[in-house]
Amino acid sequence: MKLCAFTLALDAIRFLPRQLAVFEQLKLDWHWFIISGVADSVLDTSWVAKIPPRLSLDGTDEWLTRHLDHPNITVIRRQLWPGKNAMVQAAISKITEPCVVMQIDADEIWLPSQLETICEQFSQDHCDRMRFYCRYFVGPDLIVTTENLWANRPGEWNRAWRWTPHMVSIKHEPPLFQGIGHREMDREATRALGLVFNHEAYVYEDQVAFKEKYYLYPGAVAGWKRLQAHTQFPTKLKPFMHWVEDGVMVDKIPQLPPLQLAPDLAH
Amino acid sequence: MRATAILLATGKIPSLLESVASFLTQDHEDSHLIIVNAVQRQTLVFDHPKVTVFNVKQTPCLPMKARNYAMTLVSEGAIIAWPEDGVALPGFLSSVASALDGREWCWFEKEYVFEAGQHMKLESASEFSFAFTKMAFDKCGPFLPGINGSSERNLVGRIVSMFPGEKTAVTSPNLIRVGNRDEREQVTPSAVCGHIKLAPAMTRDWQSLAQVAQSGKRKNSVCIVELGRNGDIINILPFCKMVADRYQKPHLMVAREFLGLLDGVSYVIPYPTDLHYAKLGQALRIAKADHSIVVNCQIYGEEFQQTRMAKSFNEESFRNAGIWNLFKDNTLRPEFDLRDRDREKVLVEQVRGDDRREMILVNASAGISSPCPQCTVLLDEIRRVWGEMYNVVDLTQVKGDRFYDLLGLYEASKALCSIDTAHLHLCAGTNIPVVALLQPKAEGWAGTQVRGGNCVASIFYNDVLRDNCQSLHESLAAALERPNPTIKARTPKKKVERRIFHMVDRHEDTDKAVIERKSKMMASWDPLYESGQLIPAHCWSYPRNARDILGDQRPLPYLRDLIINAAKQCRDNDILLFTNDDNWLHQDLPEYLQFHVGVYGPCSIFRTEIRGSMPGPQMRPEQIAGHSREKHVGRDGFAFTRAWLEDVGEDFPDAVLAASDWDIHLACLIRLHYGIVTTGSNIFEVISPAEIPKGYTMHLAHQSAWSLNQHDSPANNWNGQQFKTWAAHRLPLLKLTEHGNLA
């Protein structure tokens, strides 16, 4: 089945070229919708801070402009969107054929083989939707190791759906679509197929600074800096990121069980 | 499925022509129109493979009988009554065929009614939105007597009760009834008797009107208005060709009596009006209702005031079109690319007869806009002097099937001598040497300037008569010495795809009121970005700033740096659009720039300053401009291609943004591109094509930072000095102050 992925992008220049490199290795038909701009803090994302209308400041839009003629990429831009759901809807409303739809956030990295496996599962009619575990990065080489807590809560991460045109996005966080079938492939089943993605959410300081401001996490940058300087691992994350639950543990990558890691982990 | 439309004609000829024209646009291939003409005194004639005309000669002829007769001509498929006072959009018959699939009838729920010549209303459908199968008619027919549509409604009732079913829902109907009930009833049948040869044509862009009714947005289309007469229309054909080559095929609005002229050109969409050619004001209103871009080339007419700036009316027409600078360009000829060479040959042979001598064509009497009653003697005079050597042909006696058939005659002749008539315009389509006889000098503006480079002499009527035709004969002698080579048809250039990059200097604002004002304006950018009509090229950081380089208090960026940032992202033919970060943009602006920059070249955008509440965004630009009472010298936008930027090179100011003068400097530079010299008095005028019409942008009035006690700031001085130095060479007539401000 064809893969149609959508990505909401603001100041995402570090990730988009890497993601494109993954797409371009795919042996299947694919299309990537990149939706650029600020999402207004309304509806399901009304709890985040307001940002004045703008596009990216880090060269993302120049990069997008360079790829406007790419046959597999559609760029949709507004300086201010009426919420993230509107961004998603702008993309999926352009899908005209049955396909696999995936939400791939700007900081989420998959392997080409993983994306192909996902599409294969839908082609064989094994499910209508998929949920995944992720390797949640809180530093360039630090990963959250605990499960069913912050970073890998039970309801997370809904990322792939069997799609027919005219389905609509109801909300973005967490993603909910109208018209999707109920057969879900859960996290254990997808993990058994090697479908765990890298979520590079807190790898760069400016990412953390943005979250501090946008998600209203006071002291996030200072805590993140302390975590990067920390030398004893594994360790609890709470002392560094006060908004996570008590039991969340973080560890350095080399001490993790062997996993199929996405490329470019060394950055 | 075969779809047969039956039209009952009752003598309303203009609406009949519109209705038949709309049938001919139908995209359903297997379709047929039967016109049943119930007006005994008229015989309708129309030769078309998809149309059958049946002229009823019975007295009196009941419409019911006529319809029943028409039904005998139909053997199968879908049948629908076709309105004489309505039009169908191209998909109408296809939608009928598809809705009838597996059913005996279909009835669309809604149709449009076009009221008062301007409002499109959605109404419950009439019997004209009802279609049925031949089988249903065979079971429920025939039409029974009735007036005012009751005959049709009666049949509809019988079919619907015999074959129960539901009406078909439609969101955008394909049928338009022209006029409400009262308006339709007021239309009286034409008094014309005898044979009437039908020449169906649309007088409105119905698709565009329906689109406006549905979405509030006009279709992107250009309408050039030049109602007539023939000469005036021929004069602006080069402009029409330019628009077609560089942007898209334009509609050309002409009075219906001149419609035949457009059979000779492929590059316009004929857009006839039944208005007299002098009713310009009315024509412009219709054009603006139907089209997003309207260019008026006509230089006279009711409800219209023409400013006279050019030497002649036809040069003025070029000025109106925005191509004044190209009037002397002899490569721009009126091109008739659909000439009928066989017809031309027949005409040449008819005119030549048995006389095989070379021809001199003379038109000395038949002028309508510039008559010369005294000139009738000139034909005899020319025959007296030149008649022994040449076949002197009286053009007033020559009638071609189409006026442009004369092109063949021009090419076969030695010279043309004509008073001021359409010949002087048409001859520019060939190389025939021409002697033009014009209006006296005192009224020179009303006389034609012959274009094309083949005018040997232009002589004034009274001079010829005063000097005993000496000047006429000398001019003719010179003309006869010139060759008359045929013009080779030009290969049209491939259309250029252009993207528009929106360059904006962005910086973080801290003042809440400023953020609010700018956010309100920027909201108009987002739909244009989302649709891809504009590609954002915002610049937040610069290699230089005025604080570091000039010692200004503010770290203001440089214009060139902003442009370099955008230019490196685009291609040569792409358009770079600069606006300020507090400008509202009209949703038609990108398309207008595609037209303007594509057809003409660079342009600047005058500030449209708004105080108080903003006008509605759905308004047309000229309506928005009407809300601005202020005459503002400043410019809010510029648009040009990267290729133009490279041509201009170092002439482009290295100015500091958000400081004074640079906008005037750039506006003057763009004007010079068109040969327009800026003076202290014309600086406030919108001069096309250097400036686009106001209202495509808006600016909410506020105190500008650069004017607050900073008149002599380093940035302002820098810009002023640059402007002053440049203007000293390029615009010596422009008076500037010591600081480079306008005096």
Image: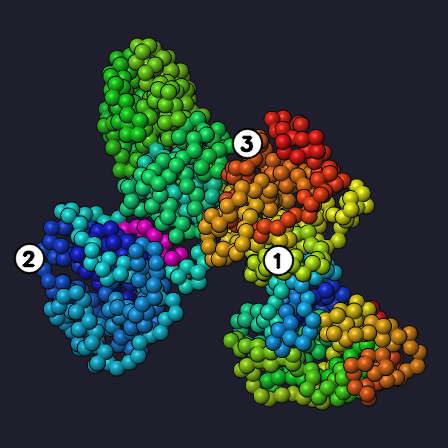
User: Is B564 displayed left or right of B238 in the figure?
Assistant: right
Q: Residue B127 occupies which quadrant of the picture?
A: bottom left
Q: Is residue A197 above or below residue B96?
A: below
> What chain letter is assigned to the residue under label 1?
B
Residue type highlighted by circle 1:
Arg
The residue most toward the left is B59
Residue type highlighted by circle 3:
Ser
Q: Return the residue at label 2.
A: B59
Q: Return the residue at label 1.
A: B517
The residue most toward the right is A231
Does B201 appear in magenta? yes
B161 vs A245, nearest the viewer: A245
- Which residue: 27% across, 75% down? B105
Q: CA distance from mark 1 to mark 2?
A: 73 Å
Q: Nearer the viewer, mark 1 or mark 2?
A: 1
Tell me residue B45's x, y (percent): 19, 50
Q: Return the residue at label 3.
A: B681
- Upstream in the sequence, badge 2 or badge 3? 2
Check disc 3: other Cα within 10 Å, few if <14, some if 14-19, many if 20+: few
B663 vs B101, nearest the viewer: B663
Q: Secondary structure at mark 1?
A: helix
Tell me residue B247's x, y (percent): 49, 47
Query: How many marks overall?
Result: 3
A202 vs B138, nearest the viewer: A202
Classify the position of the N terminus of chain B by image quarter: bottom left
Region of the chain picked out in magenta, as a range: B200-209
- Upstream in the sequence, badge 1 or badge 2? 2
